[in-house]
Amino acid sequence: MKTRILALALCLSLLLTGCEAMLHGEYLTVEPHSMLSAAEDDSSVIRVENYQELVSGILSLVSACQEQGVIQLSNYNTRDVEADLTAACLEVSHEDPLGAYAVDYIKHEFSRILTYYQATITIGYRRTLEQIRSVVPVTGSSAIRSEVQGALAQFQPEAVLRVTYFNEDEDYIRALALQAYYDTPAAAFGMPELSVAIYPDAGYQRIVEISFTYAEPVEALRLKSAQLQEAAREVAQPAVSRNFRGRLLLSALFGALLDHRAALEAAAPEESGSLVPSSWPYAALVEGAPDSEALALAFQLLCDTVGAECTVVRGTLDGQDHFWNIVTVDGSHRHVDASLGRDGFYLTDQDYQALSGAEWSAEDYPACGEKNWRKKLNLPLDNCGVFSYNISRRLQV
């Protein structure tokens, strides 16, 4: 009996000691796990509470080029879920720039699950994920022109731009693309055929898709472009090595272009005299028979090579297209026309028009001042296309 009482006392002691430890120490409680629903656990489910979030959710699927996605409408603030889903799908596919550009169709179906709706969105595309991701956001005509230049320089098949505050048409894009072509002489192998599409028809943001079809295979054009740029560096090298600046640099480049053209003509075989004049700068710097456009583009490329400010001018002469350049030195603009030979360098508007008879749009190009310093001082170009060193020092050019 005593033994039983002792054992009982011992158990009671242990029990009390354990409880005290539990009261003053750390302990772990384990409770049954409350399982979440499949929708709550699935991170791929998009949760929305109003119409604008619904539109954004569908757009997120389009941006990722997902063919199917699930949207959960919780605490949704409208009773007509069917109407909202239909309207949101139409808005994304027809009014949003990316949807109008990339989406072929959007379908939906939905069901009610306890306190929320769950919609399955199915999307068909006419663009690839790579095309969707390659859309470039831009603002303004300068940015559009710059992006087109980059595409032309690399002979890319297309440029796709998301333009903010755009209210222009296809003709506007074509005009910018033409300007970009003349600003990219290293890739000027004939203006490529353009196909322009704008998505959607209206809106403050729109996607502009510009497709290019080139005159020759891209790899052949890239090879010719590399040859053209190498020739330009060789022609410009004497002026660069002599560290010319300003007017003297332009004079050196102009004379070097004329001398190079004469050397090519002298070295060409006799049958080359029957060549059809080419408008590619390749004809002026590598081989061929350059016309005024080719010479203007070639001079533009030489100026680009040395960082001189220059632009190609498109005008008319005797009713036909005629091309030359306007250069800028210290804020002063002058005409340069290599097709006129050595007399075509650094002319004012009045002098150039009197010499060439060419006409151009005064609104599209800067005015070239009244004073023609070269003609007034009667300083001819020498054989290297530069003024003599002593005269140049006196003029501080």
Image: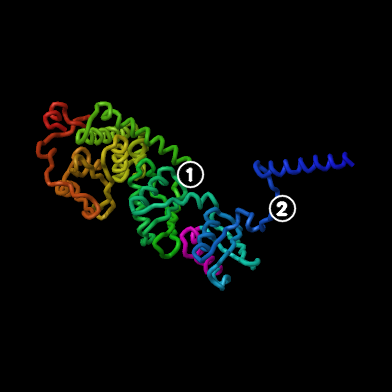
Q: Position of residue 330 (x, y in %)?
A: 19, 40
Q: Position of residue 313 (x, y in %)?
A: 26, 48
Q: Quadrant of residue 301?
A: top left
Q: Is residue 131 left or right of residue 255?
A: right
Q: Which residues are magenta?
A: 85-101
Answer above or below: position of 162 versus 301. below
How many residues crowd mark 1 within 10 Å: few (<14), some (14–19), many (20+)? few
- Residue that appears at 56% across and 66% down: 75
Q: Which residue in the structure is indicated by mark 1?
A: 217
Q: Find out whether residue 32 is within the magenta segment.
A: no
Quarter containing the N terminus: top right
Q: Is residue 370 left or right of residue 364?
A: left
Answer above or below: position of 202 versus 309. below
Q: Quadrant of residue 72?
A: bottom right
- Which colour assignment does the render follow? rainbow
Q: Earlier in the sequence, mark 2 or mark 1?
A: 2
Q: Is residue 182 left or right of residue 4?
A: left
Answer above or below: position of 372 versus 171. above
Tell me which amino acid carries mark 1.
Pro
C-alpha separation, residue under disc 2 versus residue under disc 1: 69 Å
> Which is closer to the viewer, label 2 or label 1?
2
Magenta stretch: dominant SS? helix
Q: Position of residue 7 (x, y in %)?
A: 84, 40
